[in-house]
Image: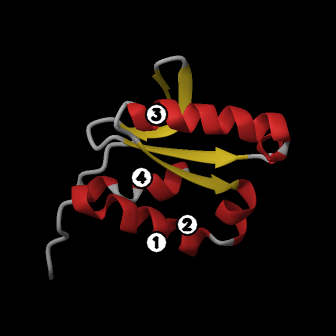
Amino acid sequence: MWNMLRDFRTRGARFRRETPIGPYIADFAWLSARIVIEVDGDSHETSEGRKHDSQRDRFLQAQGFTVLRFDNAQVIDGPDYVFLAIEHAISPFLKVEPTQ
């Protein structure tokens, strides 16, 4: 995921890893754009994990963040889909790439 997010740097995206936001640590965050990206493992698929994620998402959204969630399998098996989904979500904040 980190390499994928770094591809957006040339267009102005400034993601950070393991970023504290309130009582939580976001996997990846672009603070000025108010975007959080979470990559979830198996522990998020339990009822307790889903409850925690729901509370966390509500807190982050109340702070003005947009939260994008992907599970590990999506990132590994469908990186093109994940890249395009992220690009679509963050496109209002990206600089236009110069045409050559």
Q: Are marks 2 and 1 in contact (CB under 8 Å)?
A: yes
Q: Give percent across and percent down for residue 25.
A: 55, 26
Q: Which of pointers 4 and 1 lies earlier in the amino acid sequence?
A: 4
CA neighbours of label 2 inside 10 A, class few (<14), some (14 to 19), many (20+): many
Amino acid at circle 4: Arg
Can you identify the residue that label 1 sits on?
84
Amino acid at circle 2: Val
Can you identify the residue that label 2 sits on?
82
Q: Nearer the viewer, residue 75 or 65?
A: 65
- Residue at image location 33% in from the left, 35% down from the top: 31
Mark 3–mark 1 distance (CA, rounded to whole Å): 23 Å
Label 1, secondary structure: give it: helix
Can you identify the residue that label 3 sits on?
60
Can you identify the residue that label 4 sits on?
6
Q: Are marks 4 and 2 in contact (CB under 8 Å)?
A: no
The image quarter containing residue 24 is top right
Q: Which of pointers 3 and 1 lies earlier in the amino acid sequence?
A: 3
